[in-house]
Image (cartoon, rainbow, N blue to C red):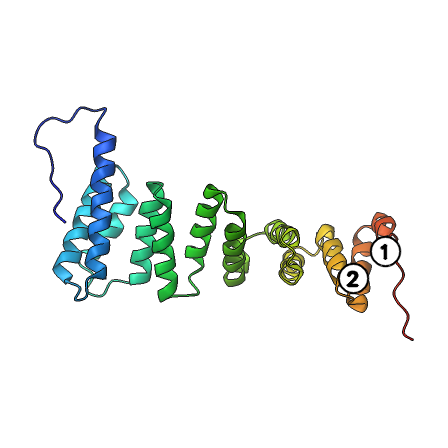
Amino acid sequence: MPIAYCLLPIPRSLFPLMMYTYLTDAITACEQALESPSPNRADFASTCRVLGNILQGMGRFDDAIFWHSRVFDDKPNLVQVYAKIGNLYSSQQQWQQAIASYYHALSLQPDFAEAYWSLAEIYSQLGKKDEEIECWYQTLSLKPKSAKAQGHYKLGKAFLAQGKPDRAIACFQNAIERDSSLWAAYYELGECLIAQGKWDNAIACYRQLLDLDPNQAKEIGKHPAEPQSP
């Protein structure tokens, strides 16, 4: 898709809008080059060069370097390319196009944690809580170290609110692995285990909790006694 540039002086007030339009057109052209039944290397290189030039003109030099580098890339990493396209759409707040690009990247590499991370942030912007939580879960399942203990704990609480105790348990366990002093994670894990009737595991969990904070004995004491075997 050719992109025309105006030769007349551009009013400064119109410059951001025009660059936005140029960038959107360039992204579309890049996608079309990738999705062609017989991808043309020259077309793809040309669209990458245009994208790089536009981003450079916008002062987005890191992004510009990526796209300029693709001009000389004989076998571009399509997972990375679609993720970068998703980043560009996201920067334009074109959320649906960004989502499609990230999922395209995931179709090529299902364990691409960075795509799930970006999707979680977009769904947060859109107020789609269930989708956001799912994407955070996929991100942390693939890269547990990308979040601190509190992040895993909060995700576990979110799954409890959704009525998904198995996933909540996994999150609380991950939280404890990262911070063995996080008593709240022990407490919530114990609650989940009791709800599932796993008394031995729950007792072990509560013992660890009491070692950390003896004051939690009052809360634990509110539970009914363990059922006796007949």
Q: Residue 68, can we see it?
A: no
Q: Residue at x 82, y 56 (%)?
A: 211
Q: Is residue 16 left or right of residue 90?
A: left
Q: Residue at x 50, y 63 (%)?
A: 142
Q: Earlier in the sequence, mark 2 or mark 1?
A: 2
Helix, strand or loop for disc 2: helix
Which amino acid type corresponds to the residue marked 1 in the rendered image?
A: His
Q: Residue 193: x and y, percent?
A: 75, 63
Q: Is residue 215 left or right of residue 89?
A: right
Q: Residue 94: x and y, percent?
A: 34, 43
The residue identified by callout 2 is: 194
Q: Residue 161: x and y, percent?
A: 65, 51
Q: Is residue 25 left or right of residue 192?
A: left
Q: Residue 7: x and y, percent?
A: 7, 32
Q: Residue at x 21, y 56 (%)?
A: 32
- Of 118 and 129, the residue lying toward us: 129
- Of 13 and 53, the residue lying toward us: 13
- Of 73 and 218, the residue lying toward us: 218
Picture layout, residue 38 above or below residue 4: below
Circles 2, 1 touching at the beta carbon (< 8 Å): yes
Image disc number at residue 223: 1
